[in-house]
Amino acid sequence: METFEEFLETIENPDHREQTKKVLDWVSETYPELAKRVGWNQPMFTHHGTFIIAFSTSKKHLAVSPEKAGIDYFADEIRKAGHDHSKMLVRFPWGKPVDYELLEKMIEFNLKDKAECTTFWRK
């Protein structure tokens, strides 16, 4: 799998596929400076060769991965917004509005926090 389109084709539920496409399109339009990449079978966005954010899907949710540092930084805000999360991702349940405000904050955090980063992942 090399393109976002190929990733989207793997999503069987058409509603989930459409919601995921909207999120990926929103990131692309809001942050045109980010490069698109598929890695580990998931669409992700990078900047100057460093990871910024990735997405994956499951039966119950769209998962957003801003790296552990992003989860740690926004843990209280994630909980207050009523989102479930793990150490590495936030779960946006299918059928509910996507929290674009939180998504934007996570992307902005990574862009600033990793501005001088020379590796793909934080060390």
Image (cartoon, grey):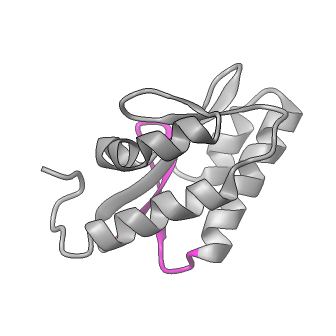
What residue sits 33% from the left and 42% below the top? 72
Coordinates of residue 88 in the picture (x, y in percent): 38, 34
State whether residue 1 appears in this view: no
Q: Furthest-bottom residue in view?
A: 33
Which of the 4 image quadrants contains residue 113? Answer: bottom left
State whether residue 3 appears in this view: yes
Which of the 4 image quadrants contains residue 13? Answer: top right
Residue 46 part of the magenta segment: yes
In the image, taking residue 12 as reference, residue 68 lies left or right, namely: left
For the residue pair 60 and 25, the one nearer the viewer reads as: 60
Coordinates of residue 15 in the picture (x, y in percent): 87, 36
In the image, taking residue 82 as reference, residue 78 lies left or right, namely: left
Coordinates of residue 69 in the picture (x, y in percent): 29, 47
> Magenta-highlighted stretch: main secondary structure?
strand
Write down the region rendered in magenta. 31-47
- What number of labels is visible? 0
In the image, taking residue 118 as reference, residue 15 lies left or right, namely: right
For the residue pair 54 and 8, the one nearer the viewer reads as: 54
In the image, taking residue 55 as reference, residue 23 lies left or right, namely: right
For the residue pair 80 and 21, the one nearer the viewer reads as: 80
Which of the 4 image quadrants contains residue 118? Answer: bottom left
Residue 120 part of the magenta segment: no
Relative to 66, residue 60 above or below? above
What residue sits 58% from the left and 56% below the top? 103
What residue sits 77% from the left and 55% below the top? 22
Coordinates of residue 43 in the picture (x, y in percent): 53, 48
